[in-house]
């Protein structure tokens, strides 16, 4: 019982220490925990260019949801992405058929102004990996597993891209 109280006390001290260190969220709802409204406003001014194929549509939707979470303003920037998915088998049965497949998703992106001519503001690349099983004789289960894995990959890429944009926009005001 005393050990539990000690751990609870340490946790409380850690939270109190965090409150005085200047920690503040990069983006989010305005006014929530002192969120940086200038970064949220910059993220809300980013339009996402069309990304080809179904996985590109999913990534574009996920990015727009995250970028415009603090509210959308008139777009001043365009985020252009190239999405690449690569698959490689990880596990094999004794007869040589794959039992597990790993997907590597890479998104190369750049942020440019909407003025004429466009001016490059930021550029970057994000990568995510995930895997899914290929069950025997269960096409629907395998397809559902693959779709869930693709969804996780897209969500991870979108989160990473928005976080990177928020950090870089906070470091280097683009005004």
Image (cartoon, rainbow, N blue to C red):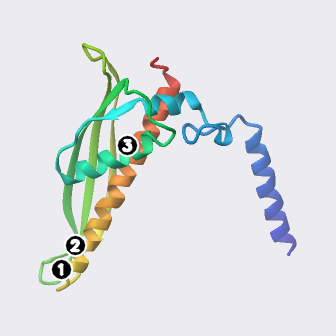
The answer to whether marks 2 and 1 mark residues whose Cβ atoms lie closer than 8 Å is yes
Q: Which mark is residue 49?
A: none
Residue beneath disc 1: 139
The residue that label 2 is drawn on is: 143
Is residue 131 depicted above or below 65 in this figure?
Answer: below
Q: Are marks 3 and 1 in contact (CB under 8 Å)?
A: no
Regarding residue 134, the answer to whether it shows in the image is no
Q: Give the SS element for disc 3.
A: helix
Q: Which badge, 3 or 2, comes first in the chain's sequence?
A: 3
Q: Name the mark nearer the viewer: 3 or 2.
A: 3
Q: Considering only order in the chain, which callout, 1 or 3, is on the residue closer to the N terminus? A: 3
Could one spot residue 57 in this view of the protein? Answer: yes
Residue, disc 3: 64
Decide: is 136 above or below 133. below
Q: Residue at x 32, y 67 (%)?
A: 148
Q: Identify which residue is drawn at 45% across, 33% down.
A: 43
């Amino acid at each position: 019982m005393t050990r539990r109280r000690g751990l609870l006390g340490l946790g409380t001290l850690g939270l109190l220490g965090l409150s005085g260190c200047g920690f503040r969220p990069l983006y989010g709802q305005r006014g929530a925990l002192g969120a940086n409204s200038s970064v949220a406003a910059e993220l809300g001014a980013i339009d996402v260019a069309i990304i080809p194929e179904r996985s590109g549509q999913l990534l574009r939707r996920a990015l727009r949801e995250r970028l415009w979470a603090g509210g959308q303003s008139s777009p001043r920037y365009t985020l252009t992405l190239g999405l690449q998915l690569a698959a490689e088998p990880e596990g094999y049965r004794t007869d040589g058929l794959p039992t597990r497949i790993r997907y590597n998703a890479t998104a190369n992106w750049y942020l440019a102004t909407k003025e004429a001519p466009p001016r490059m503001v930021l550029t970057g690349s994000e990568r995510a990996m995930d895997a899914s099983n290929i069950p025997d004789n269960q096409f629907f289960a395998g397809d559902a597993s693959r779709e869930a894995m693709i969804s996780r990959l897209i969500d991870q890429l979108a989160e990473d891209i928005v976080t990177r944009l928020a950090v870089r926009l906070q470091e280097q005001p683009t005004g």
